[in-house]
Image (tube, grey):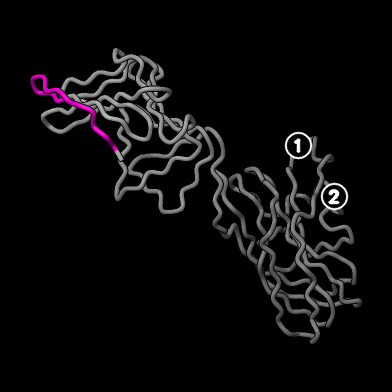
Amino acid sequence: MQKVFHGITFGRFYFSFHKDKGREFLSAVFAKHETFNFGAGTGAITSSTNLTFDDTDLSLAGAGKMEFRDTGAYIHSTDTNDLEIVATDMEITATNIILDAGTSIALEQDTTVTGDLTTTGNIYTSGYSYSDNYESLCSGSFKISSLADGTYGMPGNQGTSNTNWGFEYTNGASGLGNTSQHIGHVVPYDCVLVGVVGKMRATSAGNWSFSLWSADLVDGTNAASQTWTESINTVPVNQSSASRVYRFATTTGTTYLEQGDSIIPTALNGSGTESDVYGSYTIMIKRVN
């Protein structure tokens, strides 16, 4: 319980001395009912020159801090016209929040937006901008005649525009000679190769899978140094019945591709016997701007 010892009126101010929980206080009450408490002991304000009030504005001079709860959460001025809020976590709850800067607003760490981000201007970045949305890079259809067991079938020298694929290699696109490495799809922009979805129909039952091989094709005389990587390989589909359509898909790839890189689609026969195979596919990516 707070006990008031005595008080005195001076002009527009009423000063009272009181004691609360063993601590002594001096209170100054203004005409508009604003109150200041000047305590005694460890919580006392030892000097009033750093804290001023002119009946309108309350000023904290220099680098003084206004602390909340403990010494780890406070507001202070680091320099002239600069204000800094320091805390481990800070939450602002409001219907609308307006950040009105004269020049720019800098977000200097990773930033997550859980809702929509709308802008009436442009978005510029000095790094890459990644999207979590899958996009279709390209699609195609194919037919491979008499594909041997354990062999990858892929487009011939006419490229993916010809649906009759003509090359067959047991080591996939790595079996291509220098004069045949042009046959794939060319990546038009930087992206992450996510995977492929499609359907196949084979004349023989057994296991079938679909793969995407990628490479950074260098120019001209360096063509001999090309290295193809099997970046995407779908889980084998066990076609229990011949000449039936089966679906294949994988969308967990993480291979980064740059503008100009090549992707070669291939179908792998694991059925145990030679077979014709037909199908269609769509290559999926995440765009990187």
**Residue 270 percent across, percent down from the top left:** 87, 72
Q: Is 8 located above or below residue 267 in the figure? A: above
User: Is 6 within the magenta?
Assistant: yes
- For residue 89, side relative to residue 194 (left or right): left
Which of the two residues, 53 or 19, is positioned nearer the viewer here?
Answer: 19
Mark 1: which secondary structure?
helix
| Span shown in magenta | 2-14
User: Is 42 within the magenta?
Assistant: no
- For residue 206, side relative to residue 114 (left or right): right
Residue underneath mark 2 = 177
| Residue type, mark 2 in image | Gly
**Residue 29 percent across, percent down from the top left:** 17, 28
Which of the two residues, 116 or 66, is positioned nearer the viewer here?
Answer: 66
Residue underneath mark 1 = 220
Q: Residues within 10 Å of mark 1 (few under 14, many from 20)?
A: few
Q: Residue at x 83, y 39 (%)?
A: 225
Mark 2: which secondary structure?
loop
Residue 282's image quarter?
Answer: bottom right
Residue 85's image quarter?
Answer: top left
Residue found at the far bottom of this picture = 241
Main secondary structure of the magenta stretch: strand
Residue found at the far front of this picture = 5
CA distance separating discs 1 and 2: 14 Å
**Quadrant of the rendering where the N terminus is positioned:** top left
Pointer 1 or 2: first along the chain: 2
Q: Is residue 14 in view from this perspective?
A: yes
Q: Is residue 155 in view from this perspective?
A: no
Q: Is 42 located above or below residue 241 in the figure? A: above
| Residue type, mark 1 in image | Gly
**Quadrant of the rendering where the C terminus is positioned:** top right
